[in-house]
Amino acid sequence: MTITFADLPSELLIAILSEACTDSGYTGCSLSLVSKDFRTLCLYSGVDIQCVALYGFQRMANFADMLKTRDKGARKVMHLFITDRDSVDNLLSSLTLNENDDSFARRTLENILRTISPHHLRTLTIHIPHCILSTPAGHPIFSYPFPSLTELSLYAGLNRQFFDNFLPSPSLKRLNIASYITLPEDIGASVCRIAPNLTHLRISLRTHRAYFSNIREVIKNYIEDVSPPTPLLSKPPIDFLASPAGDNPLPLSMGELPPSVHTFIVAFNPLCKAAVGSLASRNMNMQHHTDVAWVKRAIPSHPAWYGPGKCLLVQDQPSVIDLDEPEGVSLSTSGTMYSEWKERIQGNAGCWKHISTA
């Protein structure tokens, strides 16, 4: 008697296919075309959509429409990557940049997040550089819970409203803020509220005093929350809250991260290639070097510091980009974030790869 693959119990089939459907949706899409039995299994279990990468807003809209044809119990997206690029290698967004498109982008993204099963989503990466994810007048993204979400990476227009409207996510362990417009002055308190059990935090900084100041006390508190801290210092102690020469005094902010955070990565976004006669770009790069210098003075054994149960890593050697080609930043981050997302699904380091296990 010959037993075919389709003769196996559905529970065993689902377990086998779950291991195979981790390639951004390619295997899942092919499964539905194999036979009617496989198609029925996919519609019943959602195994074909457990790992999905969406490129461009049209595919996002199509995916949301497809989800609505399924029972809620079969919308089991576990790992989701979303980008406004039509492909990882595409240089440009699939939309032009204007207010209507920004609103459309938020609605499309919200439509997907509201349609998938909230109890199954574990890993989410969003790469939409020009989209403001939350506005005072609009419906905020993440104003509804994802109880199983453990890892979140964001490259988008994050602002104060976004952090204020984000519901607490006790299961969230790893947070990667790859880009933002502004960070809350009390970013430490915001992270505590959003992810009280966070273990890994990565923030890519915008090197400008108005942006960098929000993270300085977070760095200070993270290092000083060690007893005793003095033996770890490899350089003379400094006043962590003192502004560099010529700066105005900075207001204090709430910088305490959740005590569960044992890995904190501070990355610096790429420098800009100063165009001829471009005072603005030269000032930006000067500010960058000033901020990096502060970090080097402040962090013991820079660029990596290890305290009892803690690690702080600084990535301060960014590439140089041409101001005449600003999309180059988003191009590189789209491909990088996709690769890191896939690595994390497979159990590898992803954006945390530079961390020593010592």
Image (spheres, helix red, strand yellow):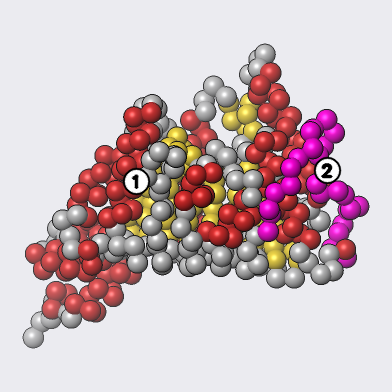
Tell me which label, 2 or 1, sits earlier in the chain. Answer: 1
- Marks 2/1 in contact by CB < 8 Å: the verdict is no
Of tags 2 and 1, the one toward the viewer is: 2
Indicate the quadrant where residue 289 lies: top right
The front one of 330 and 195 is: 195
Does residue 355 show up magenta in the picture? no
Amino acid type at image mark 2: Ala
Judging by the rendered image, the residue that carries numbered circle 2 is: 242
Tell me if residue 330 comes above or below residue 300 in the rendering.
above
Q: Residues within 10 Å of mark 2 (few under 14, many from 20)?
A: few
Is 294 left, or right, of 104 in this rendering? right
Image x and y of residue 135, in percent: 44, 39
Image x and y of residue 20, in percent: 31, 66
Quarter of the figure with the C terminus: bottom right
Amino acid type at image mark 1: Leu
Q: Which residues fall within the magenta stretch?
A: 231-256
Judging by the rendered image, the residue that carries numbered circle 1 is: 109
Please report the residue visible at 83 percent of the width from the left and 30 percent of the height from the top.
246
Indicate the quadrant where residue 306 lies: bottom right
Q: Residues within 10 Å of mark 1 (few under 14, many from 20)?
A: many
